[in-house]
Image (cartoon, helix red, strand yellow):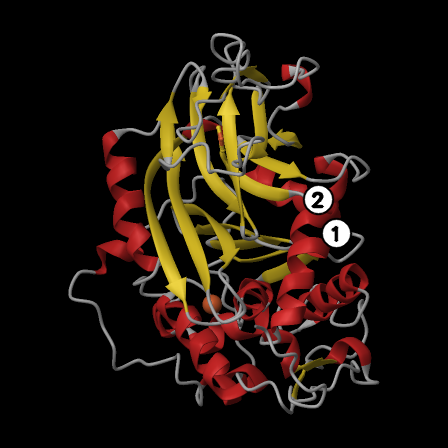
Amino acid sequence: MNAALPADSAPALPRQWPAQGVTRVPYWVYSDPNIHALEQQRIFQGASWHYLGLEAEVPEPGCYKTTYIGEQSVLLTRGEDGSLHAMLNRCAHRGNMVCREAFGQAKKLYCVYHAWSYKLNGELSHAAFQHGLRGEGGLPKDFQLAEHGLRTLRVATLCGLVFATFSDKTEALEDWLGDVAAGIRRVLHKPLKVLGYDTQRIHANWKAYHENPRDSYHANILHTFYGTFGLSRQSQESGMVLDRQGRHVYFYTKAGTEKTSADYQETADKLRSHNDALTLEDPGILRWRDEFGDGVSVQILTAYPSFVLHQIANSLATRQLLPKGPGQCDLVWTYFGFADDDEATTRMRLAQANLAGSAGMISVEDAAVCEMMHRAIADGASGESFIEMGGRGLESGGSSKLSERAIRNFWHNYRQDMGL
Ligand code: FES
Ligand SMILES: [Fe+2]
């Protein structure tokens, strides 16, 4: 027997967003299970486009990949005619997961529970014992295979990236990305080749990580490897680009363009991340090639709500952020190069992959601060963050990297989607 909990037994959490708007984020938003459930509905199954993977991961007819949008298991398939399809990885019969492997190749999608099988586009092609046996059992006479396919999603691609959305109304993918699509086109300018994967469990709410690559303010301050070895410093030419809605952002830095000034030097001398005492036994990892011909050594691009594309020297990777309950998330790193890379270029990319990923010399610190932050704010009972670097508005901060403009814009879009 279930005894109803007395109404006052649950701790009362404040649900009022602070009056200062997007310059404050109440800490309950990172830990409240009701907020987490609402996010699945309003953000992950709402109007956004979500990154599923690379076209290069499903290169041939019949190839499929299992992944997630939020916490919902989804399938990306390539049909016999070469077209891409996305669908829930959930059998239309009784909800069993249809494909279990991370990747595979098949002529049909077969549910092991009662042998319903689906075409690669999600249409149901067969239901075991549909007509019963010896006049008994079976599905009703009016059962139509065509009415029981897998739930399909809208799919779109850009430069080899595959996205899907639950919404029929959302604008086309390139319109949704707006000016930030230029940062994707700049890097993904020819066919890709997957080099490997790395999945990292981060013990923090997904939004704490989502804020991080939008946070151009921290990059040259937290990361010793950037500042000390000069891949990215505040004294270098840099900038930030947002789309019109402020959903997406990329920022970039050009190594070798140092312009020092008295006010820069005064701060830089005090930064932990500028440490002249550190040297590398093998500086080979820092030898990078300006393959895009524009001098940009680092470009970090973040699409709302869960996609990152990075170019750090010649290390290229996508990052897919997958919530796993309110207190943890998975970050799936897919390292890639180009199909026409020679052996030496591939070796250089693989060596530089050590800058990123769960143990990367740069990015190891990102997950660490997310987890430290999570421990410090986890009870969600009080407190709020302060996001006024570069000003208080959605435009303020302009294109300066010394700004939290992209974070304010994230929370603006988040609040709109969530109705908070
Ligand atoms: S749950 Fe898939 S066939 Fe029954
Ligand atoms: Fe970082």
Name the foreground residue: 169 vs 387.
Answer: 169
**Where, quadrant-wise, is the N terminus in this rendering?**
bottom right
Report the residue at 68% width, 48% height from top: 45
Above or below, comparing residue 331 to residue 58 in the picture: below
N-terminal of the pair, mark 1 or mark 2, is 2
- Residue 19 quadrant: bottom right
Above or below, comparing residue 203 to residue 158 in the picture: below
**Where, quadrant-wise, is the C terminus in this rendering?**
bottom right
Q: CA distance from mark 1 to mark 2?
A: 7 Å
Please give left or right for residue 233 compared with residue 171 in the image. left
Name the foreground residue: 244 vs 260.
Answer: 244
Name the foreground residue: 307 vs 89.
Answer: 89
Q: Amino acid at mark 2?
A: Leu
- Residue 409 quadrant: bottom right
- Disc 2 is placed on an element classified as helix
Name the foreground residue: 312 vs 194.
Answer: 194
Identify the disc placed on residue 50: none
Q: Amino acid at mark 1?
A: Asp
Report the residue at 47% width, 17% height from top: 128
Q: Position of residue 87 (x, y in %)?
A: 58, 32
* Residue topped by disc 2: 177
Question: Answer yes or no: do the residues labelled 1 and 2 have beta carbons within 8 Å?
Answer: yes
Other residues around mark 2 within 10 Å, as few (<14) / some (14–19) / many (≥20): many
Q: Position of residue 198 (x, y in %)?
A: 33, 51
* Residue topped by disc 1: 243
Q: Is residue 248 visible?
A: no
Queried on whether the Cβ of the residue with tag 2 lies below 8 angstroms from ligand 2, the answer reads no
Q: Position of residue 80 (x, y in %)?
A: 50, 10
Q: How many marks?
A: 2
